[in-house]
Image: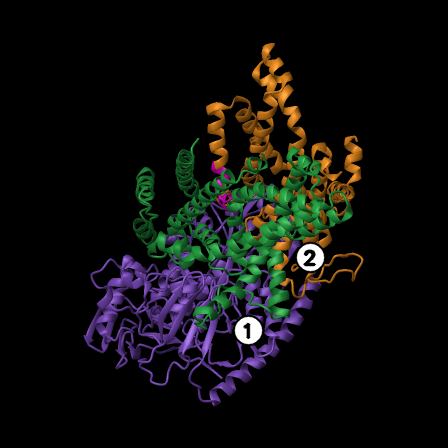
Chain colours: A orange, B purple, C green
């Protein structure tokens, strides 16, 4: 079975993919759907959802359109998810590759650093980092990236360690290719599959992490995110449920979609595992 | 946005008048009844205070709890008239220079030792002079001497007439602490700080950190029939939404000001057996404003500051952001404080005028950074609303958030363009108002000084003269003048006289009877 | 490598990591704007230069950074976690008072997530590729994918307010002064909501890992051998696959111990649970350096210990050794 057909065989993964594409569409089309700022106070506060056509999902405590916030939030939340994952990959992949490729004391030292970051409770570290750097989209992305790279490094190291002994890598070493070139051209491309699987899940965790930071008052005050909306509406769960419910659903669907796609990729990219299904 | 405001205002007025009627009914019937002995009250105070030794710490939560453990010379009613506390009676000399306090008989400290004039002199002359940031300038600049004439009499003599001294006798400003436990010790590291000993109606029993503080009835209180309650617990719940649920499930009896999200107040106030009052804050009269850093470019321009004032929809702030609580101020002095005058230049919401003034000021679209106040969601919503108001008239504003230490650091080092602030007025402009405007108070390191850097010799002189003017009439004249000067110059943009609703079970009677409300309220409170 | 030598080397490595964490934290927290004196000033709503100076002297913040670092490290070397001037008590006492609550919460959550997660993982793996597999994984994801604080508040409204089954916040009924069994039951009833909220969050993670681990082991040679021997599939699943699949989960859960403590920050905040997660956040916004560093140290030490223990368990009961 090829990759595509294996992926398509997993119904959950397909549902996830459709959801994800829809979300990305929202993110891209957001400014066109809702050209004005989502922070604008446009109507009576606490307008219930599905009552007027103009404000389909109701308005919040200050009379801001929940739907506009949701759509603009899609962009920022997904952006934070992807960029912070990218940051984590930029740290984790090279560290893991170096550790796995060279082994010895380099491996030892790099793995100590990884262990170091895995020992500190990651959410606590993220909180401290954002507090130190002051809340802004940059500090949030950086903090999430810094606390999420260790698993990447471990994964890459493991993969590289096993790839290193393969014939084609040994051959490359024998013909005298430079170490960097071997790592980039022979080793890393073969680790892409598991990295992609892991990254899809990391995007999901990053979105959740941002919402938690936002809840603790450590969000970027100038950007509308889902986490901000859920946090700001939480005291009105009893009588204005829609303010935090819709962004909550958005987070749920996104995380779900990314997980399903990740699961599907995992099964599709690891044919070894699907043998268990005979 | 205008119709939004009106709608909410009407809604609010209805709720408010109903609540007011209920509160009046409640207090009228309470007076008629005799207090019942016994009972327990669970009171939400937030956040958990750092300590309960009120002489060393005057944070809001500390005052709310410790005000029932410690006492001061005077209490104040909701009109800010002084009432006896540790001082049975007092006399002010004609020229407002000599204050004589006669102490209650038979007052004992919680450890059984007798209380006397020595404790008062030690507290005011030694202890608080060294550690209390508000008492220190008064005692150093105004007081000539503090002495006891006998065991029950203390005389404070001033260098010049100083009427506001009485207001400094409130419990958070001058709590009387036991000389026998503190004299000659390292005050800040005294082991008794963890087990506070006062003279008040309640004794400290236990503090389970992260969970609750327990106070128990002082059986030897000098007023024989007080207090009525056996125990008062202060549970600590960090999340506002969870605090509201705790009240609804019956776990707690009192939600003090600021304990729940202001948006949640009308819903909670409608619950059965629930009363609400905004009284009990008259002494503090918290005054909220935006401080522009006048050293920074365009913010030094009076036109621009006036433009900002016209641009801000302060009614929206009051009616929507603060859910109808509070009053729009006219100047630096709260309408609840002495010597208030509304005979000043007024600013209404006028975006058109704001745009003209923005243009006239020479503003070129530079981004202005607004340092938010990390005291909960309401302040964040307010900053968001003001950002939109500014955007409407072409002012670019960016919100910067930080936590409490970050805010203090940035504010006291003048590292901001605009920032929120709110300060207590403490009864008299000489104590709580002038500190934010006089040029003598421009100094790094104090977030509650004149951090914006406004400097006007005329205002300086008016404030200085008004503080020590011999008669109330003369003081009023000078304070009216200074309010006019400041309303024209706008050293800060006054936004709201804040009001904090206290929500409580109606069967708790006489809870809020003074100008500091729950802070010293459990002396007289009783449970039906 | 003998067990004693392995243990010694792991402990040594643990100490090195803890030392590095202690130093990093020291600088990290001092890089944050403001200090404890600023916080006290901010809270008091009143301050002057003398007030701040007094506080800084009291807190020892007027000394040089190397000096402060020296005092701090010297203390830690002798397991003295320092003194909280804000609370006027030793950090050991402050943290020690809060630690049991966190251990109780995270312990309960750990058991819930591990038990439920493994069960769901086994069920999903047995149905791999079918719709019921997706359904199980998706159901487990509900609690993972919804913000924890939202679930926490929702559960308070539903189970404490509307249904009245359990209390919504706190560690025990304040003012009741229960003792013995009554107190234990009282604490247990307060534990239900926070433990479930935190536990269900991690359930999805373990369910996923368990599923993957099951599938991987199912493809391993020794299972093929077992099948070839003609063992019944249910016996193979139960005795061979599940038993071996759970070991890596336990190890991974060991690595996740730190995450659990991190998750406790939110859970303890929303449920007013008097543990060290909340203490950590409070100490951060109060810039109570000594307490913050103490909490970080205790958490990290727990994670290191936990990892060593799981490593030991793993070495003692390596599935492959047993399979051979």
Say the numbered circle drawn on residue B250: 1
Q: Picture coordinates of residue B464 (x, y %)?
A: 36, 61
Figure label count: 2
Asked whether the viewer can see residue B251, the reply is yes
Image quarter of the N terminus of chain B: bottom right
On whether disc 1 and disc 2 are found on a single subunit, the reply is no
The residue mark sitting in front, 1 or 2, is 1
- The residue at 38%/64% (across/down) is B431
Magenta segment includes A120: yes
Q: With A258 as the anchor, is C13 left or right in this view?
A: left
Magenta span:
A116-128
Which is nearer the eye, C298 or B223? Answer: C298
The quarter of the picture where residue B325 lies is bottom right
- The residue at 50%/68% (across/down) is C186
Which is nearer the eye, B106 or B348? Answer: B106
Disc 2 secondary structure class: helix
- Crowding at label 2, few (<14), some or many (≥20) Cα neighbours within 10 Å? some
- Crowding at label 1, few (<14), some or many (≥20) Cα neighbours within 10 Å? few
Toward the left, the furthest residue is B150
Q: Picture coordinates of residue B142 (x, y %)?
A: 28, 63
Asked whether the viewer can see residue B319, the reply is no
Toward the top, the furthest residue is A175
Instruction: Establish if A115 lies above or below A167.
Output: below
The residue at which mark 2 appears reads as A245
Q: Picture coordinates of residue C108 (x, y %)?
A: 53, 56
Magenta segment includes B295: no
Toward the front, the furthest residue is C229
Q: With B359 as the anchor, is B78 left or right in this view?
A: left
Q: Picture coordinates of residue A225 (x, y %)?
A: 65, 48
């Amino acid at each position: 079975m090829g990759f595509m057909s294996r992926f398509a065989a997993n119904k959950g993964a397909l549902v996830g993919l459709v959801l994800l594409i829809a979300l990305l569409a929202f993110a891209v089309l957001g400014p066109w759907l809702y050209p004005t700022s989502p922070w604008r106070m446009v109507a009576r506060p606490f307008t219930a959802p599905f009552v007027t056509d103009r404000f389909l999902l109701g308005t919040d405590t200050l009379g801001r359109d929940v739907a506009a916030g949701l759509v603009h939030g899609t962009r920022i939340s997904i952006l934070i998810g992807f960029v912070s994952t990218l940051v984590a990959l930029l740290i984790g992949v090279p560290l893991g590759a170096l550790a796995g490729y060279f082994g010895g004391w380099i491996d030892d030292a790099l793995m100590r650093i990884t262990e170091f970051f895995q020992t500190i409770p990651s959410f606590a570290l993220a909180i401290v980092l954002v507090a130190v750097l002051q809340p802004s989209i940059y500090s949030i992305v950086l903090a999430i990236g810094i606390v999420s790279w260790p698993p990447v490094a471990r994964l890459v190291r493991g993969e590289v360690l096993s790839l290193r002994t393969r014939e084609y890598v040994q051959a490359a070493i024998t013909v005298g290719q430079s170490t960097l070139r071997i790592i980039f051209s022979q080793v890393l491309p073969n680790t892409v599959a598991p990295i992609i699987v892991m990254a899809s899940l990391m995007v999901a965790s990053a979105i959740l992490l941002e919402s938690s930071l936002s809840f603790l008052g450590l969000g970027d005050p100038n950007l509308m995110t889902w986490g901000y909306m859920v946090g700001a509406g939480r005291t009105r769960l009893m009588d204005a449920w829609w303010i935090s419910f819709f962004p909550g659903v958005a987070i749920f669907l996104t995380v779900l979609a990314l997980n399903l796609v990740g699961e599907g990729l995992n099964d599709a990219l690891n044919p070894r595992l699907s043998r268990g299904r005979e | 946005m205008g119709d939004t405001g009106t709608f909410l205002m009407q809604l609010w007025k209805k709720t408010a008048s109903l609540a007011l009627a209920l509160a009046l009914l409640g207090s009228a019937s309470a007076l008629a009844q005799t207090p019942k002995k016994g009972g327990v009250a669970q009171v939400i105070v937030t956040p958990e205070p750092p300590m309960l030794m009120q002489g060393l710490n005057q944070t809001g939560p500390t005052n709310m709890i410790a005000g029932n453990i410690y006492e001061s010379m005077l209490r104040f009613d909701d009109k800010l008239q002084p009432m006896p506390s540790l001082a049975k009676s007092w006399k002010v000399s004609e020229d407002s220079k000599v204050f004589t306090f006669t102490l209650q008989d038979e007052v004992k400290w919680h450890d059984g030792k007798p209380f006397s004039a020595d404790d008062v002199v030690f507290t005011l002359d030694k202890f608080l002079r060294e550690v209390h940031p508000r008492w220190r300038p008064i005692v150093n600049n105004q007081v000539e001497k503090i002495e006891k004439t006998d065991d029950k009499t203390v005389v404070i003599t001033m260098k010049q007439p100083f009427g506001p001294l009485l207001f400094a006798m409130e419990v958070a400003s001058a709590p009387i602490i036991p000389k026998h436990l503190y004299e000659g010790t390292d005050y800040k590291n005294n082991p008794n700080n963890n087990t506070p000993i006062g003279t008040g109606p309640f004794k400290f029993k236990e503090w389970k950190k992260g969970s609750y503080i327990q106070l128990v009835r002082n059986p030897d209180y000098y007023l024989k029939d007080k207090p009525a309650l056996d125990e008062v617990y202060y549970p600590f719940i960090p999340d506002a939404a969870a605090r509201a649920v705790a009240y609804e499930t019956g776990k707690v009896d009192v939600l003090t000001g600021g304990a729940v999200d202001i948006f949640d107040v009308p819903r909670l106030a409608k619950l059965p057996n629930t009363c609400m009052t905004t009284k009990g804050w008259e002494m503090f009269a918290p005054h909220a404003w935006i401080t522009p850093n006048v050293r920074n470019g365009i913010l030094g321009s009076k036109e621009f500051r006036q433009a900002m004032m016209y641009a801000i929809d302060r009614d929206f702030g009051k009616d929507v952001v603060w859910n109808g609580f509070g009053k729009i101020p006219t100047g630096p002095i709260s309408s609840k404080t002495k010597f208030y005058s509304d005979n000043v230049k007024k600013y209404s919401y006028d975006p058109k005028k704001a745009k003209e003034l923005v243009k006239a000021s020479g503003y070129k679209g530079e981004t202005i950074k607004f340092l938010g106040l990390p005291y909960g969601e309401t302040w964040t919503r307010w900053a968001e609303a003001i950002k939109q108001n500014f955007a409407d008239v072409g002012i670019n504003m960016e919100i910067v958030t930080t936590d409490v230490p970050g805010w203090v650091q940035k504010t006291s080092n003048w590292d901001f363009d605009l920032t929120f602030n709110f300060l207590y007025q403490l009864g008299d402009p000489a104590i709580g108002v002038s500190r934010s405007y006089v040029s003598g108070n421009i100094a790094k390191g104090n977030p509650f000084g004149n951090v914006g850097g406004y400097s006007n010799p005329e205002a300086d002189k008016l404030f200085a003269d008004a503080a020590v003017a011999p008669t109330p009439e003369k003081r009023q004249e000078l304070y009216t003048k200074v309010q006019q000067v400041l309303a024209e110059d706008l050293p800060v943009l006054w936004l709201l006289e804040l009001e904090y609703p206290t929500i409580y079970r109606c069967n708790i009677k006489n809870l809020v009877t003074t100008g500091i409300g729950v802070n010293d309220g459990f002396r007289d409170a009783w449970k039906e | 490598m003998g067990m004693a030598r392995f243990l010694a080397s792991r402990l040594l490595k643990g100490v090195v990591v803890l030392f590095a964490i202690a130093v990093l934290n020291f600088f990290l927290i001092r890089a944050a704007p403001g200090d404890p004196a600023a916080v006290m000033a901010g809270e008091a709503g009143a301050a002057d230069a003398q007030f701040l100076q007094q506080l800084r002297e009291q807190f020892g913040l007027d000394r040089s950074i190397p000096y402060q670092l020296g005092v701090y490290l010297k203390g830690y070397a002798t397991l003295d976690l320092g003194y909280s001037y804000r609370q006027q008590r030793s950090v050991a006492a402050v943290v020690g008072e809060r630690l049991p609550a966190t251990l109780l919460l995270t312990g309960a959550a750990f058991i819930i997530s591990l038990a439920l997660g493994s069960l769901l993982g086994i069920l999903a793996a047995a149905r791999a590729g079918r719709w019921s597999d997706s359904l199980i994984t998706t159901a487990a994801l509900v609690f993972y994918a919804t913000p924890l604080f939202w679930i926490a508040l929702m559960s308070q409204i539903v189970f404490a307010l509307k249904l009245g089954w359990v209390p919504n916040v706190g560690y025990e009924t304040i003012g009741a002064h229960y003792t013995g069994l009554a107190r234990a039951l009282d604490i247990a009833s307060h534990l239900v909501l926070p433990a479930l909220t935190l536990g269900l969050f991690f359930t999805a993670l373990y369910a996923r890992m368990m599923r993957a681990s099951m599938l991987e082991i199912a493809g391993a040679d020794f299972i093929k051998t077992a099948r070839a021997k003609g063992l019944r599939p249910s016996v193979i699943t139960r005795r061979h696959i599940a038993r071996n699949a759970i070991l890596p989960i336990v190890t991974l859960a060991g690595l996740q111990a730190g995450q659990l403590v991190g998750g406790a920050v939110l859970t303890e905040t929303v449920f007013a649970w008097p543990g060290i997660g909340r203490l950590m956040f409070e100490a951060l916004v109060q810039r109570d350096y000594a307490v913050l560093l103490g909490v970080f140290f205790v958490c990290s030490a727990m994670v290191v210990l936990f990892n060593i223990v799981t490593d030991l368990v793993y070495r003692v009961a390596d599935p492959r050794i047993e399979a051979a």
